[in-house]
Image (spheres, rainbow, N blue to C red):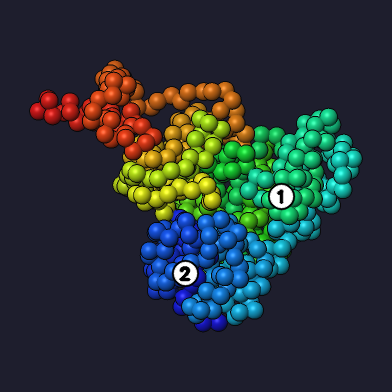
């Protein structure tokens, strides 16, 4: 199988741009596809070729498999990278690529089908000797069957959609009286989102952490684990902050969990990049699911282990045998923050509008994966994530402080983002001590806790902050101009200005 020469990127936004950049570095030509809403998007501007799919809604554009394959044939693309979301885990795309003689830059259909079905994957993992959470291996036909299973397992339990993903079709049931409502709601949600309302019952793990392992395999039977990631900072099963490697694990767990991840991947003859996710609690870990695609949080692994996962995927799709990756050692620590266009103070409602002011962070250990630009329209059609900040450091504390500095430098006007919440979380005692579980964010919001500001550690700093806030509330003209783009002026930016003015006055 010859190396790939031209790759069609069947996605949009930051992941499309991320794939495009690696292709450019490899000397591989790129074909971008786009919707009416993305005519001015950066991936459209930077690709070698770009073609319109259709209207702004995903069903009219990025989910148009027929149109994507038509463009692949028209342009002579010999590979298709699906990114994440949309068609990334759809076996129909793999089958279409095989029929057209185009390399699918991802795993085989069998792996995708087994791991895409929660019950099938549980059965496969049990057979492979991978630890799983106690629960059913067949769907519950109705509420009565779910109640019987929960009685055997013991409350509290989780109702989960067999074909679920992205936090949809999941409900916690703490006592029998909650089962009927939870079953109806979760099953209906799953049927709407995935076309499959089957539910299974699983023991609820107490105070779990979300630990995942990056795996990469090739078509020659090799499969390697590339470290662990911590993804416990999440809300409604949607990740907000991720880091690598996972810390505060019991002795030997990191090695054992990576071995289990490789066993899981080999059980379905996996190749390409994928992620095996586990719940970790009180020294034990349990298989949760496998994402048969590139993960949003893959950059933290790249920064710590010095690899380009997109490049590895392209090389595997071209038939190359991977070099031995088992000897890779972590170098320092990396933290990723997802920047979502949403209002955390208003139940995470989407924030729509035009990006009218933009300042991205730079400096040592700072990486930005994004496709946001001045004048970009944030529409209701797509995921709220518009950028990712990745901070790397010699250790976790340096990475954490660098991320805080990056968030201070970041400014995206015109829309409200999740950056403020991320800054607050990074300063909490739980995060600093690396002991937050998957329910931390909900508890944090319910308790209404205010973060402790690390920057106000002396009277001069406090005075500067007070002066900056006073100027903002008084509506001083210089500050009004800077904050007119929307979202307001961060007091930390204002403090920086106060410092500069004070320094000039003292010279």
Give the residue displayed 9% in from the left and 28% down from the top: 507
Residue 334 shows in this picture: no
Q: Does 309 appear above or below 7?
A: above
Residue wearing tag 2: 51
Q: Does 59 appear above or below 480?
A: below
- Residues 273 and 34: in front is 34
> Residue 274 appears in which quarter of the rendering?
bottom right
Q: Does 74 appear above or below 251?
A: below
* Count of numbered circles in the view: 2
Residue wearing tag 1: 192
Q: Residue furthest left?
A: 507
92 vs 495, left or right, is right
Indicate the position of residue 24 as horizontal and vertical percent values: 39, 69
Label 2 secondary element: strand
52 vs 208, left or right, is left
- Residues 228 and 124: in front is 124
Of the 4 image quadrants, the one containing the N terminus is bottom right
């Amino acid at each position: 199988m010859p190396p790939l020469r031209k790759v069609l990127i069947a996605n949009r936004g930051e992941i499309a741009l991320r794939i495009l950049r690696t292709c450019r570095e490899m000397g591989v030509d790129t074909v971008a596809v786009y919707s009416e809403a993305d005519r001015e998007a950066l991936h459209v501007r930077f690709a070698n070729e770009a073609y319109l799919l259709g209207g702004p809604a995903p069903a009219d554009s990025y989910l148009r498999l027929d149109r994507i394959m038509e463009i692949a044939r028209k342009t002579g693309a010999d590979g298709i990278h699906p990114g994440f979301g949309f068609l990334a885990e759809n076996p129909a795309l793999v089958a279409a690529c095989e029929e057209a003689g185009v390399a699918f830059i991802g795993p085989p259909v069998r792996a995708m089908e087994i791991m895409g079905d929660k019950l099938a994957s549980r059965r496969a993992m049990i057979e492979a000797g991978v630890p799983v959470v106690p629960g059913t291996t067949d769907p519950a036909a109705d509420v009565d069957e779910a109640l019987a299973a929960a009685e055997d397992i013991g409350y509290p339990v989780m109702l989960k959609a067999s074909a679920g993903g992205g936090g949809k079709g999941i409900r916690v049931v703490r006592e029998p009286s909650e089962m009927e409502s939870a079953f109806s709601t979760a099953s209906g949600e799953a049927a709407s989102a995935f076309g499959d309302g089957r539910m299974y019952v699983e023991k609820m793990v107490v105070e779990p952490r979300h630990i995942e392992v990056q795996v990469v395999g090739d078509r020659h039977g090799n499969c390697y684990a590339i470290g662990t990631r911590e993804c416990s900072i999440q809300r409604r099963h949607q990740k907000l902050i991720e880091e690598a490697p996972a810390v505060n694990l019991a002795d030997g767990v990191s090695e054992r969990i990576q071995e289990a991840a490789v066993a899981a991947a080999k059980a379905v003859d996996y190749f390409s990049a994928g992620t095996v996710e586990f719940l970790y609690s009180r020294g034990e870990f349990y298989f949760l699911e496998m994402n048969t695609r590139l993960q949003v949080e893959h950059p933290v692994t790249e920064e710590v282990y010095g690899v380009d996962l997109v490049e590895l995927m392209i090389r595997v799709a071209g038939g190359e045998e991977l070099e031995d990756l088992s000897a890779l050692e972590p170098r320092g620590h990396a933290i990723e923050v997802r920047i979502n266009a949403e209002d955390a103070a208003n139940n995470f409602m989407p924030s729509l509008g035009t990006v009218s002011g933009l300042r991205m962070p730079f400096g040592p250990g700072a990486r930005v994966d994004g496709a946001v630009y001045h004048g970009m329209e944030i529409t209701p059609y797509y995921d709220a994530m518009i950028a990712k900040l990745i901070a790397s450091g010699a250790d976790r504390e340096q990475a954490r402080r660098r991320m805080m500095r990056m968030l201070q430098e970041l400014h995206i006007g015109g829309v409200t983002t999740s950056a403020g919440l991320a800054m607050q979380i990074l300063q909490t005692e739980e995060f600093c001590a690396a002991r937050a579980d998957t329910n931390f964010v909900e508890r944090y919001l319910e308790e209404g806790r205010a973060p402790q500001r690390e920057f106000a550690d002396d009277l001069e700093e406090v005075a500067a902050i007070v002066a900056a806030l006073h100027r903002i509330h008084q509506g001083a003209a210089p500050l009004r101009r800077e904050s007119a783009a929307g979202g307001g002026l961060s007091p930390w930016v204002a403090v920086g200005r106060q410092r500069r003015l004070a320094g000039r006055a003292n010279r």
